[in-house]
Structure formats: C-alpha cells, structure tokens
Amino acid sequence: MSIPVSILNYATLNKMKRRKKPIWLLFLGFLFLVLFLYLIVFFSPESSINMLPFFFILIFTSLFFLFFFLLSNFRRGIFIGLFVSVYLLLRFLDLTHIFFAIMLLILFITLEMFFSYKK
C-alpha cells in the first residue's frame, strides 16, 4: 500500500524550519504604545511644551514595531506606520476630505507594489 502524495507533502512541510519572531519587537511596540498613551493622558493640549512631534513619532514607532512583529516584514511595518501617521497629520491640518484619504491609500499601495516587484 502506497502513501498518497499529499500526505508526503504535508509531512515535509511540517519538517521545515520556522523563523522565530523576535519578541523584543513586540516589547518595543508595546513600550512605545504605553508612552503614547502616557502622552495623551498626562499632557494637556494647552501645555507650554509642544507635544505634537512626540505624538507623531510615538504613533509611528509603536505601529512600526507592532506590525513588523505581526507581519515579519520591515517594509510593510514602515508603510503602515507612515500611512497612519500621515493620515493623522492630514486630519490635524484639516484636510479631512475623503479624496485625501483615497490618494494616500493609492500612494502607499503603489509604493508597496513598486518595492515588492522583483526583477
């Protein structure tokens, strides 16, 4: 009696080595997320210190590290972090029309397709 080919393929796929995800990426993502929440809760918008750059930097870094860990892809982590940061920056500048969000989405999809294309 012979073993079906599909079972053999399944057995060889299970023997393949899996890449471990570095746990420090998840730790850094949550650390920057906690710092971001601390910034929101404990600093008022009327404070004398301008917290706006810290807001965008913390949003970007926390999303970058979390999505880098989840997707195991550096480029996609950067793109998702940049997409959310730029979208929030556009909202801050009162550019809230749906056209801006669609154009931003098209830009990042185009960038992803450009960088993922292999010659």
Image: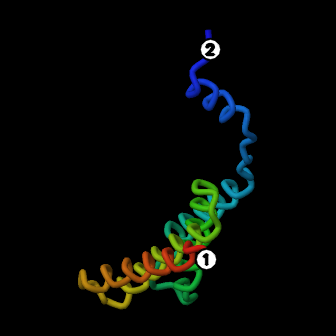
Tell me which corner region of the image, top left, top right, bottom left or bottom right, holds residue 62. Answer: bottom right
The relative height of residue 33 versus residue 87 in the rendered view (above or below) is above
Residue behind mark 2: 2
Q: Position of residue 100 (x, y in %)?
A: 31, 86
Which secondary structure lies at badge 2? Answer: loop
The residue lying toward the viewer, choosing from 36 and 4, is 4
Identity, as a three-letter code, of the amino acid under mark 1: Lys
Q: Is residue 96 left or right of residue 61?
A: left
Q: Position of residue 48 (x, y in %)?
A: 54, 89
Quadrant assignment for the N terminus = top right
Residue 119's disc number: 1
For the point 53% across and 74% down, the residue is 79
The residue lying toward the viewer, choosing from 110 and 51, is 110
Quadrant assignment for the C terminus = bottom right
Q: Nearer the viewer, mark 1 or mark 2?
A: 2
Q: Position of residue 96 (x, y in %)?
A: 27, 84
The relative height of residue 95 versus residue 42 in the rendered view (above or below) is below
